[in-house]
Amino acid sequence: MNKLLLVSLLSAIIVFAQQGERKAAPKAHVLTVAEFDQLFAKPDQILIIDVRRPDEISSMGGFPVYLNIQAKDLAKSLAWIPRDRTIVTVSNHAGRGSAAADVLTMAGFKVAGAIGAMTYEEQGGKNVVRIVPPASGGAKKE
C-alpha cells in the first residue's frame, strides 16, 4: 500500500512540474492579408519588427521596410524600440511573431498583431520583397 501511495504521489508531482514548464501559447492577434495591407498603407503610423534571422529574411523574403530584432534579442532591445507607432511583428508563419507581439504588449507597446511573411505571400499578399545578391557584390531588390 505504501508503494502505491508513493508512486501516485511521485506521478502527481511529475505531472504538476511538467505543466509548470510549459510556456503559455501566444495571445497576439494574427493579422489577415487585408488587415496587414490596411496597416501597411499608412507606413508613417506603423513599425514592422521582423524577428527572424537575417538568412531567413534574405532567403524567404520580407517586407520592404522593417526593423530586424531577432526573437532571442527582443527583451533586451526594448529601450530603443520607438513607442510612437503601432507595431506589427513578423516571422515566417507568425509563431515567433506572435510570441514577440506578446512580449511587446506586456512591455506597454501598442501592437496591432503578428503576421507570417510566408503565410502572407501564400494567401495572396503582394508586399513581400526578396533581396537577390548580384554576382559582383552589393544587393538589389527583386
Image (cartoon, rainbow, N blue to C red):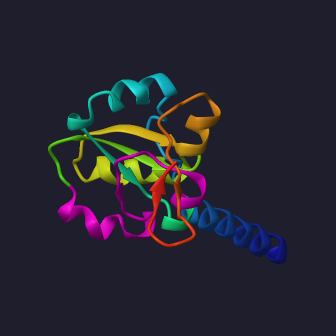
Tell me residue 36's x, y (percent).
42, 30
Tell me residue 94's x, y (percent).
53, 45
In the image, 108 versus 56, the foreground residue is 56
Q: Residue at x 83, y 77 (%)?
A: 3
Q: Residue at x 80, y 76 (%)?
A: 2
Residue 44 inside the magenta-drawn segment: no
Quadrant assignment, res 10: bottom right
Tell me residue 41's x, y (percent).
32, 27
Quadrant assignment, res 116: top right
**15 horizontally vs 104: left or right:** right
**83 horizontally vs 26: left or right:** left
**13 horizontally vs 83: left or right:** right
Q: Which residues are magenta?
A: 57-81
* Residue projecting furthest to the front: 136
Residue 72 inside the magenta-drawn segment: yes
Whether residue 17 is situated above or below residue 64 in the rendered picture: below
Q: Quadrant of the N terminus?
A: bottom right
Whether residue 44 is situated above or below residue 6 in the rendered picture: above
In the image, 107 versus 48, the foreground residue is 48
Tell me residue 24's x, y (percent).
51, 52
Whether residue 6 is situated above or below residue 27 in the rendered picture: below
Q: Residue at x 53, y 48 (%)?
A: 25
* Residue projecting furthest to the left: 84
In the image, 106 versus 31, the foreground residue is 31
In the image, 103 versus 66, the foreground residue is 66
